[in-house]
Image (cartoon, rainbow, N blue to C red):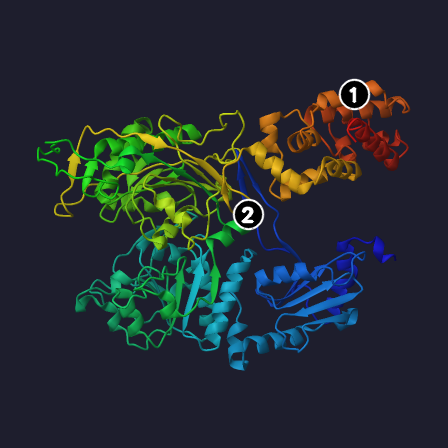
Amino acid sequence: MDKRGLTERDICTKFILPAVKRAGWDEMLQVREEVYFTKGRIIVRGKLVTRGKAKKADVVLYYKPNIPIALIEAKDNNHSVGDGIQQGLDYAETLKIPFVFSSNGDGFLFHDRTSTGGIKEANLGLDDFPSPADLWARYCAWKGIDTAAEQIVLQDYYDDGSGEQKRYYQVNAINAAIEAIAKGQDRVLIVMATGSGKTRTAFQIIWRLWKAGRKKRILFLADRNVLIDQTMMNDFRPFGPVMAKLSTNAKTIERQDGAKVDLTLALDKKRRIDTAFEVYLGLYQAITGPEEHQKLYKEFSKEFFDLIVIDECHRGSAAADSAWREILTHFSGATQIGLTATPKETEYVSNTDYFGEPVFTYSLKDGISDGFLAPYKVIKVHIDRDVEGYRPELGQVDRDGAEVEDRIYNARDFDRTLVLDDRTKLTARKITEFLKESGDRFQKTIVFCVDEEHAARMRQALINENADLVAENMRYVMRITGSDKEGQDQLGNFIDPESKYPVLVTTSRLLSTGVDAQTCRLIVLDRAVGSMTEFKQIVGRGTRVHEDTKKFYFTLIDFRGATSHFADPDFDGDPVQIYEPGEDEPMMPPDETPDGMDDIGQASYEAGNDETIIYQPGVPLPDGGGPRKIYVDGVGARIIAERVEYLDANGKLVTETLRDFTKTALKNRFASLDDFLKRWKSAERKQAIVEELEAEGLPLDAIADELGKNLDPFDLICHVAFDRKPLTRRERAENVKKRDVFNKYGPQARAVLDALLEKYRDEGVLGLDDTNVLRVTPFTTMGSVVQLIQAFGGKEGFEKAVREMQDALYQEAV
């Protein structure tokens, strides 16, 4: 057998994997091939949504399921044994894998990232691959895991039987937390971007510690009732009868199969605690309060809980005077795990001071880069009154006839102390314009308002702007705020991907954290957001990808300048574009710039997928619910500015047309026209070049929409990158016919070649030498596949003829 003639896959199958098995690795339980660990960045350009190339490790070795400890990068035998080591090390850094191997089938280059063996890199023969026990011993020595800790670290994950694989960063977070706790660490902080699965990760940590017998009584704390209910019915459901909610209010939850169940409660009507459960979930507000009789947590002994998990722990839980801190202090002997998307660091509050440095961090930027989280567009709307301020005319009176204080009111005053009704109506109108221009008025939308009263007025303004859809269903626009029971009752429907209504919801702060609104496509900010922590949380409402409904990105409309946080170095997930509409300009980013070309910084959609914005106003404050507001009618407002930007490959915001972007990218790929022509001529599969460009985030479909669908990829590249005059596919096909290049073939072969040329001309098919093309019309009417190939003297003759035809298509160019 000539090794040099084998593919990389063959080398892996015939030489690498047998060597691994001989070393004692279990093929079924410990060895996985072609492990894709990212999904590929979602790329939004024009109306096209694509994914970049996913990262894939050739072989990953697991000591136990979900405990990866070694990675092998394979190369064919034309490469040296160590040619894959740098790529392997890059992947191992991401996957937190300590042992990396590269092989070409002759042997292995072994890189030990732990250095516990004394040698960093060594060459090994095919029969010298280390055993699972050897690598695990090195791993434990590196991590400082003793025999007692090892029993916990090796505790199995919960397996629901679905076969669904955990994402690599979730595995990293779970293992990091388990290892830290197994070694005695009692304060653990995990930082994971909103939408990346913090609660699912927490469940596996709790499950493994509970099953190992290390933690027998667990308290899970959150600050939103909906978070507790979601958690009990979804991620924590496997705990079953040992789990209960610290509440006196039973709530019926509808499961995905339609069955309704009551949550198990640990409190009776007199707020007495049933201590027979092992896993308790509760709101910190429900078990503590300013009065001593409200401090329910004190009815548990200080030693009752072994483990406390605090969800969204950035919300003040580490502040010395917070209610949460009381609970943590009371159960100070318990291991405490903080979960957050945004570790809070201020002069007064420091989560890292309380919990220590995070044992694991996965940022919004990481999630977007990996393709697990949705990128987003930003539309900035500048209203003249916000920019210029408002000073009342002499003697101006408000709605109640009282004289308005003579001073300059600015954006901070609007809707907090001074209400300009025309401004509210303008905001609602611009949101509605965006929805209409997008072509989808049923995009789930959250509108963040200054307070509950502002949310009520915004709701009313949106209802008036969308009267036709409200007439069909009153729940099209709803306010969901803390004091609005009817609105809160609809929160479950809003976050349910299967529920059509409500569509537009207005709120003040209730929906800013923790609510798992997977299909939210539009977030509207009509209030200032001073806190970076809260801004990240608000952005996180839209970052979940929901492929079933084609939600791959979302839109954020900013009326208050809150997106200035993007310029803060602490913000870690930049937008793909920013668009600022001016007066009388559309809310949807335009499809064309003034010179008639598609703009890369405009709205980005996939076929059948729309993204839009919507506002939801709310209900007035109850009597005495806040300071008196001044209402001034008849003061106009208008839009004064608009801008479009997008992120380039280096993460910098630039303004550029689609054509300019494509030209730059192609020239980076092909140094010159000659370079491209040589590559095109030498490629047996022309489609392979197109696929490579797509994998690098440069699909040609978008530029074809602009220049013409009747152009070959060859002509698109030559024209855009090197200013060559393009020929249409029809012109190229006609040129081949004029040269009469088929005259040396018999009648049936000529008929096949003519039909292939028509396929190219009409449909742009490039893979003409693939015999599968002969299985569709019109070839099926000419004879069987075998007969048609035989007309060329066999498969080699068919492929040779087609390649000659393809050479003829590009003859004058190459």
Q: Position of residue 604 (x, y in %)?
A: 50, 36
Q: Is residue 267 visible?
A: no
Q: Position of residue 681 (x, y in %)?
A: 79, 36
Task: Describe residue 407's horizontal placement relative to residue 259 as left or right.
Answer: left
| Mark 2 lies on residue | 650
Eyeballing the image, is 491 above or below 796? below
Q: Nearer the viewer, residue 497 or 411?
A: 411
- The quarter of the image holding the N terminus is bottom right
Q: Position of residue 129 (x, y in %)?
A: 73, 71
Residue at 69% over, 23% down: 728
User: Of discs 2 and 1, which sits in the foreground?
Assistant: 2
Q: Farthest residue to the left: give it.
A: 402
- Circle 2 SS class: loop
Task: Describe residue 101's horizontal placement relative to residue 531 as left or right.
Answer: right
Q: Nearer the viewer, residue 717 or 284?
A: 717
| Mark 1 lies on residue | 735
Q: Mark 2 and mark 1 in contact? Answer it, CB < 8 Å.
A: no
| Residue count near mark 1 (Cα–Cα under 10 Å), binned few <14, some 14–19, many ≥20 | some
Q: Is residue 723 visible?
A: yes
Q: Residue flagged by tag 1: what amino acid is it? A: Asn
Distance of label 2 from label 1 (alpha carbons): 42 Å
Residue at 52% over, 66% down: 157
